[in-house]
Image (cartoon, grey):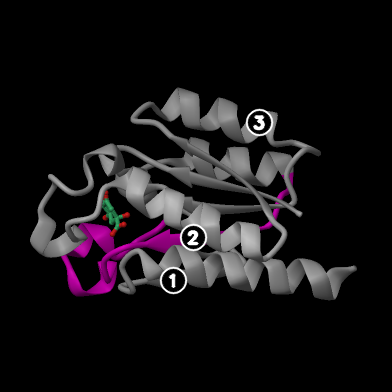
Amino acid sequence: FKLLVINGPNLNMLGKREPEKYGSHTLSEIMSELTTFADGLDVELTHFQSNSEQALIERIHSAWRAIDYIIINPAAFTHTSVALRDALLAVDIPFFEVHLTNVHAREAFRHHSYFSDVAQGVICGLGAMGYRAALEAAVNRLQNAN
Ligand code: DQA
């Protein structure tokens, strides 16, 4: 299976950014660990991070008919981006939404997501482990679909 992990704005700052909330690991540490985990599951994992809404939209477009499942942490765009939501609907690729923190325990503006009602599942508050859980669940979904 081909899986794409997408991380939105400021997630390139993991490790430096509010470590009490987001932990001390960098994004590249988290993604290289995830790649090792994916290798064991026979999954081809691609990772893309951008701070730009346009670049994220274009990466989703190029996943059309090329990617089986998407795991996305839209970061701040979670709460703002109809365009990113529409891009995921346009390519018609099932996806899981992941957040490191429990967004529901934070500021009110983080309680609404433009993605959750069209996601196959949502994980929040598990830290980096959320990506692993999403990956395992995605593989499970894909295996049961075939
Ligand atoms: C986040 C939560 C968002 O509210 C925030 O803007 C982020 C990260 C998370 O992973 O917990 O940048 O998506």
- In terms of secondary structure, where does tag 3 sit? helix
**Residue bearing mark 1:** 123
- For image coordinates 72% across by 40% down, the residue present is 91
- In terms of secondary structure, where does tag 1 sit? strand
The reply to whether the C-beta atoms of the residues labelled 2 and 1 are less than 8 Å apart is yes
In the image, is 95 to the left or to the right of 133?
right
In the image, is 97 to the left or to the right of 65?
left
User: Residue 104: horizontal and vertical position, in percent?
Assistant: 26, 72
Marking on residue 70: none
**Residue bearing mark 2:** 97
Question: Which amino acid is tagged 1?
Answer: Ile
Q: CA distance from mark 2 to mark 1?
A: 6 Å
- For image coordinates 29% across by 65% down, the residue present is 111
Q: Residue 109 in magenta?
A: yes
User: Residue 48: horizontal and vertical position, in percent?
Assistant: 49, 36
**Residue bearing mark 3:** 61
Question: Which amino acid is tagged 3?
Answer: His
The residue lying toward the viewer, choosing from 120 and 47, is: 47
Q: Residue 75 in magenta?
A: no
User: Residue 28: horizontal and vertical position, in percent?
Assistant: 36, 43
Q: Which residues make up the magenta segment?
A: 92-113
